[in-house]
Image: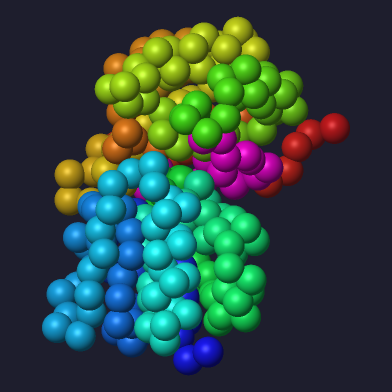
Amino acid sequence: MSGWVQIVGIGPGDDALVTPQVQAAVAEATDAVGYIPYVERVAQNPNLTLHASDNRVEIDRSRHALEMASQGKRVVVVSSGDPGVFAMAAAVFEAVEHGDPTWRDLDVRVLPGITAMLAASAACGAPLGHDFCAINLSDNLKPWDLIDKRLRLAAEADFAMAFYNPRSKSRPEGFEKALKTLKESCGDNRPMIFARNVSRADQTIKIVPLQETTPDMADMRTVVLLGSSQTRIIERNGAPMVYTPRSVDG
């Protein structure tokens, strides 16, 4: 088959953080598929047809991309950040597994991007400098009981943590429940970092002691990081630097 699918990450927002590899794939593509705001970030090209769709239709979007590729088109499936982190890569492979058997012979590749948690970590230092985990706080695709269990176990293991999709208008109670669990499980005042619109011109970074955090500090444009018990803050003139040491005593 002459067509292909490349699942690309366009980074957290700043065009300078889109990799040359992804730029080259988009330049070569005939079609781009993705969630509306992500497709809008793709550079206009008279030879590129844009197929924007709403949220929560990841599998339908993936099937569409694979169908076009099987017809010989060169398709980029666009994700923000990295396509393998709570994004479209897994959806495309799920569609391949359960779809037309001929799709397994297509040239399907994943091109990595800079995800929001790494951009947020870099913006304030290195809070993810040692062992860490990433948890999606949306309960659209998994039950809240599982999210709560993972929060408690991550706190018990003393991971630094990154949280995606912390709070939306349709489920504002989720982040409130998450904060309650974290405050109880961690039992200390380790720093929590709220990075909103990270890497964009209107980026804001707030560093707040865990026990002083409130649910309204985050929205769907915010990625939230939580240090481990070992995370340090270096005070200085201007914004403090936050890091987690690479070694652990004992």
47 up-or-down from 14: above or below: below
**In this view, 100 is above or below 210:** below
Answer with the quarter of the image where residue 217 lies. Answer: top left
**Residue 158, image x, y percentages:** 69, 28
Colour setup of the view: rainbow
How many numbered marks have been drawn onto this rendered protein structure? 0
To which quarter of the image does residue 114 belong?
A: bottom left
Q: Nearer the viewer, residue 40 or 241?
A: 40
Residue nearer the viewer, 133 or 70? 70
Residue 129 on the magenta span: yes
Q: Residue furthest right?
A: 250
Percent x, y of residue 74: 39, 82
**Where are the magenta residues, as a range?**
122-136
The outermost residue toward the front is: 100
Q: Image quadrant for the C terminus?
A: top right
The residue at 46%/46% (across/down) is: 117
Quarter-of-image position of residue 232? top right
Q: Residue 44 or 200: which is nearer the viewer?
A: 44
Say whether residue 239 is visible: no
Please state the horizontal and vertical placement of residue 211, each as a whole percent of the image: 47, 10
